[in-house]
Image: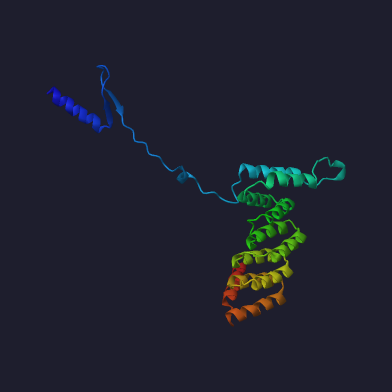
Amino acid sequence: MEGIGLRSCGEEILRLGFMVRRGVCGRFPIMRRAMEIKMRDRSKNRKPLQRGRMLSIEAIQAVQALKRANPPPSPPPCSTSPSSPAMLDRVIVSKFRRLLKFDMVAVLRELLRQNECSLALKVFEEIRKEYWYKPHVRLYADMITVVADNSLFEEVNNLYSTMKSENGLMADIEGFNTLLVILLSHKLFDLVMDCYTFMQSTGYEPDRSSFKILVQGLESNGEMGLSAIVRQDAHEYYGESLEFIEEDEEISSGTSVLI
């Protein structure tokens, strides 16, 4: 009976995952729990990076250093700041040029978010010198939005001219439509019509959304002559029917009456 009990006890021990080692010099056997270790790929736990939004420590330090080197202008008698173009250039060299690609873009977007227009323009000049830089209409639209919102219309013209002169400009119809909305909202009608022509010259024909944006934006600002040009082009693209424009006009007018 004792043998049976010991055998069943041993089977139970093995079932529970214990390993039995023989005793040394007559000592009792040692029981150790067998452990199975599984290694997991920790990279699967990492959250995806939000490029252009999440700032690294280096990017944050670069933004802070740039702002310290370029404080708001103060009257000459009270100007005790060591800020100078030379200091800003040193910060560009020591802090900004050492950043990785995505950190550079993140710094630019953070400066735009903070309405630091002069610094954003300076940083953008540096980014354009990088070997990996690829011009895109959407990036120009983002920059023009902030610069125009700060009433820096000379810089708007400069940015727009630079965009047109870029080699290998990457674009899409949505990017051009966004730019048209921005220019219309600031009543820059010369640039609006130039952009309308430029997008066609680069191979991006206006779609229905483009014509809606242009016709409604121009007519709401009383630019009926310019709107007539766009309407004529819309007729050529879509025939005699401009229902996609007329429907929106009826909806907007009906909504205004209800309000």
* Residue farthest bottom in this picture: 240
Tell me if residue 176 comes above or below residue 23 in the rendering.
below
Give the image quarter of residue 136.
bottom right
* Residue farthest left in this picture: 1
- Asked which colour scheme the image uses, the reply is rainbow
Task: Determine if residue 70 is in view.
Answer: no
Report the side of 126 relative to 237 (left or right). right
Q: Which residue corresponds to the image point at 77% horizontal and 61% vertical from the top-left?
A: 154
Measured as percent of width and height from the top left, residue 115 is found at 70, 51
Task: Determine if residue 57 is in view.
Answer: yes
Q: Which residue corresponds to the image point at 24% horizontal and 33% vertical from the top-left?
A: 15
Give 140 or 24, whichever is nearer the viewer.
24
Give the image quarter of residue 38.
top left
Measured as percent of width and height from the top left, residue 29 is found at 26, 22
Measured as percent of width and height from the top left, residue 201 is found at 66, 73
- Quarter of the image that includes the N terminus: top left
Give 215 or 117, whichever is nearer the viewer.
117
Give 18 or 217, whichever is nearer the viewer.
18
Report the side of 151 relative to 234 (left or right). right
Measured as percent of width and height from the top left, residue 37 is found at 37, 36
Q: Which residue corresponds to the image point at 50% horizontal and 46% vertical from the top-left?
A: 47
